[in-house]
Amino acid sequence: MTEEEPEPTIRRRPGGRAARVRQAVLAAAMEALAEGGPARLSIADVAARAGVNETTVYRRWGSREKLALDAMLTASDEGMPVPDTGAVRTDLAAFARALADYLATPLGGAVARAAAFGAEDPELAESWQTFWRTRLDQVGAVVRRAVERGELPPGTDVDLAVELLCAPLQTRALLGHGRIEPDLPERLADLVLDGLRGR
């Protein structure tokens, strides 16, 4: 190559076909979950919605339970990212607000209702356990960081802290006995922190 010749340009497809298929299938699965919940999810329906063969879905996910789990985790990751503002109160309030917004969506509502009633199918029940354990671990990072910064005492029960923050929002969304006021996320963050620090 001479000095006058330009460097060859390498063109790469962003993501490629595999990424596009995964995105289409997960979007279709989220749509189906919003309509019928995890118990009514079928690979045939998801494949038809995504415009792919059922074998493509089976090859990548293996079962409807694994597909439901991946779709629910993806949706919750996108709709409820774990905040890192540098302060535990604003982190907890931001996550509570994101959870309230997620529960107000068709998918969030369907997932919450399905979770409340559980699953008779052992594989689906196991997927639920994995879903909740994964989310508790992810959101628990907020509490663990606060302990490391000295904002919360050593030995703080991470899972209990997250459950105390989320339970009132889930209860209101599921039972509909009270609305989620604009300042509720901040109030819940304060109540959780008062309880954790008051020991």
Image (cartoon, rainbow, N blue to C red):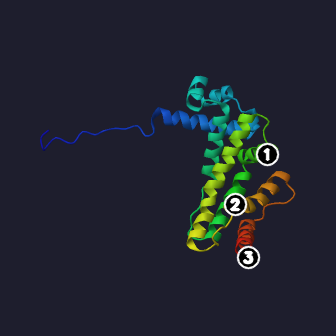
Pointer 2 with pointer 1, Cβ within 8 A: no
Which is nearer the N-term, disc 3 or disc 2?
Answer: 2
Check disc 1 and give the amino acid type: Arg
Question: Marks 2/1: CA distance?
Answer: 19 Å
The amino acid at mark 2 is: Val
Q: Residue furthest front?
A: 155
Front position in the image: 90 or 153: 153
Measuring 74% from the left and 35% from the top, which residue is drawn there? 122
In the rendered image, which residue does mark 1 sit on?
Answer: 113
Residue 15 in picture, x, y percent from top left: 45, 39
Q: Residue furthest right?
A: 177
Q: Is residue 150 left or right of residue 3?
A: right
- Residue receiving disc 3: 198
Q: Which SS class for mark 3? A: loop
Which of the pair 67/7 is nearer the observer? 67
Q: How many marks?
A: 3
Q: Residues within 10 Å of mark 3 (few under 14, many from 20)?
A: few
Categorize mark 2 by other alpha carbons within 10 Å: few (<14), some (14-19), many (20+).
many
Q: Circle 1 sits in a helix, a strand or a loop, which is it?
A: helix
Amino acid type shown at disc 3 = Gly
* Mark 3 vs mark 2, CA separation in Å: 17 Å
Q: Nearer the viewer, mark 3 or mark 2?
A: 3
Residue drawn 67% across the image and 46% down it: 131
Using the rendered view, name the quadrant where residue 149 is placed: bottom right
